[in-house]
Amino acid sequence: MTHRIADRRAIVQVRWGPMAYRKAVLEPGQVLRVGRSEATGLALPHDSRLEEEHFELAWDGSRCRIRDLRTSAGTLLDGKPIKEGVVPHGGWIRAGGTDFVTYVERYTPADTAGDESGSVADSEGRSKALSLLGSQDGLYAVLDAARDARILTLLRESVEEHHSLYEGPKGVALAEVAPYLVRLPRESMLLNSLVEEGWGKAWGVFLTSNASFTDTRRHFRKFLMIELEGAEGRFYFRFYDPRVLSQFLPTCASQQKADFFGPVSSFMCETLVEDTHSLTVHPA
């Protein structure tokens, strides 16, 4: 799927707090207002320090302009008060008590220098995986940002809904290495990037679920920490590593499997067989 530069969208995302990862997407030529009012394009009613309409973003397909809407508290762009200006890719905006970050869709190209994944993960397996995944309804992925910095770059520069499985101070402190749930609708360009760039690298696992994003995330948060028989304390459970999940699922008793799957109808993860990666489907 091709995507011309002129078609790329701008993304503004809440960075921290109770509405972290909430985002709005601007098509070329679109203007977005942000504030406390529900009538704005990106509303944060919980932030009492925001004005009803606090600032405005305008995206022309190549530049994102910001304008403070004559607020008493003002708006900061990369730490400096502004009335209006140009927001760079990755630019930080602070308005009221909320931090925002802006991105341009698919801004950072893949670094293919020294990439030898093709010697292990064959192109045929990658193509079959993409075909199967792209045909699924209710497709999600749980991705391990600790595996590769490229994962967070792809998430931030995509319009797809995503959220860390961590919350609170841990979510802030471990944002760069957290597991992330992402929804992958049909025709998702992010799905193409995840398979093309991450195939054979154990970036995460795919799954299908008819549950809402919120309910699916709530379900997986229950399994981040587990207790092991014969051991004291709780341990991180990296179920989102395809190598771990492929070993874990066949050992589950029926009730344990039912509890782990919950609203999930199937898991799909890479399996290495005779030096070739393939996509293995684990149905509920």
Image (cartoon, grey):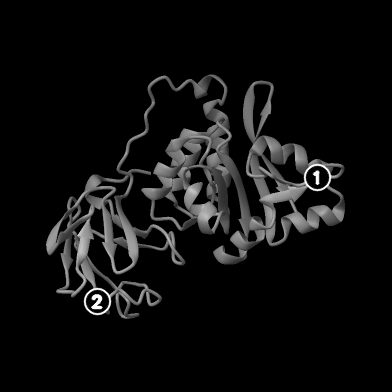
Up the image or down, 105 lies above or below 194; here it is below
Q: Residue at x 29, y 69 (%)?
A: 96
Q: Earlier in the sequence, mark 1 or mark 2?
A: 2
Tag 2 secondary structure: loop
Q: Quadrant of residue 236?
A: top right
The label shown at residue 81 is: none
Task: Classify the position of the C terminus by image quarter.
Answer: bottom right
Residue under label 2, please give it.
53
**Tag shown at residue 232:** 1
Depicted 18 relative to depicted 5: above or below: below
Cα distance in 3D space between marks 1 and 2: 52 Å
Q: Is residue 178 left or right of residue 11?
A: right
Callout 1: helix, strand or loop?
A: loop
Give me the residue at 58% from left, 34% from top: 202
Q: Nearer the viewer, residue 210 or 51?
A: 51
Say which of 185 and 107 sits in front.
Answer: 107
